[in-house]
Image (cartoon, rainbow, N blue to C red):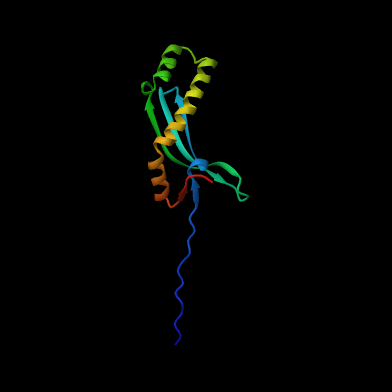
Amino acid sequence: MAERPVALPSQTRDVVSYEDDVFAWMYLDQLDGLVRYEAYVIGYDDAGRPTTLAFVLEEGAFPIDHFPLVHALWNASRPGRLSAEDWRALHAFFEEQEKELKRARRHNWIHRLRALGYDVINAL
């Protein structure tokens, strides 16, 4: 009787580009007075075009006094609303904080992605 060759299952793992597919979003939660953030991974359609988020990798919150600029704007606007100028300042600030959060949490987020079964590369 002839021996059959061993056939191993083939598996392909999805690849995530940390620079291109992982994003951080930070915003002011006006109801709770917290600065919240989410780290998420975007998906792709069958043609390879980016779509919306595929899943949230991490979410969290900071007390508002963790960020002196946000805390000062928040206190100055009470009890009224934030002005358009305040919102522009917050958006610019959060944009920089999102970059810093992505840089600071890189090791943890890559570890988490690998634990979820993804191969992680730096950039496409």
Q: Tell me what residue is drawn at x 43 percent, y 47 percent.
A: 113
Q: Tell me what residue is drawn at x 47 percent, y 39 percent.
A: 40
What is the quadrant of the N terminus in the image?
bottom left
Where residue 9 appears, as percent x and y from the top left, is: 46, 66
Where residue 30 appears, as percent x and y from the top left, is: 45, 22
- Number of marks drawn: 0
Where residue 65 appears, as percent x and y from the top left, is: 36, 21
Where residue 108 appears, as percent x and y from the top left, is: 38, 42
Q: Answer with the quarter of the image where residue 73 lies.
A: top left
Q: Residue furthest right?
A: 47
Q: Is residue 30 above or below residue 118?
A: above
Q: Tell me what residue is drawn at x 38 percent, y 42 percent.
A: 107
Which of 2 and 31 lies nearest the eye of the viewer?
2
Q: Is residue 29 above or below residue 124?
A: above
Q: Residue furthest bottom?
A: 1
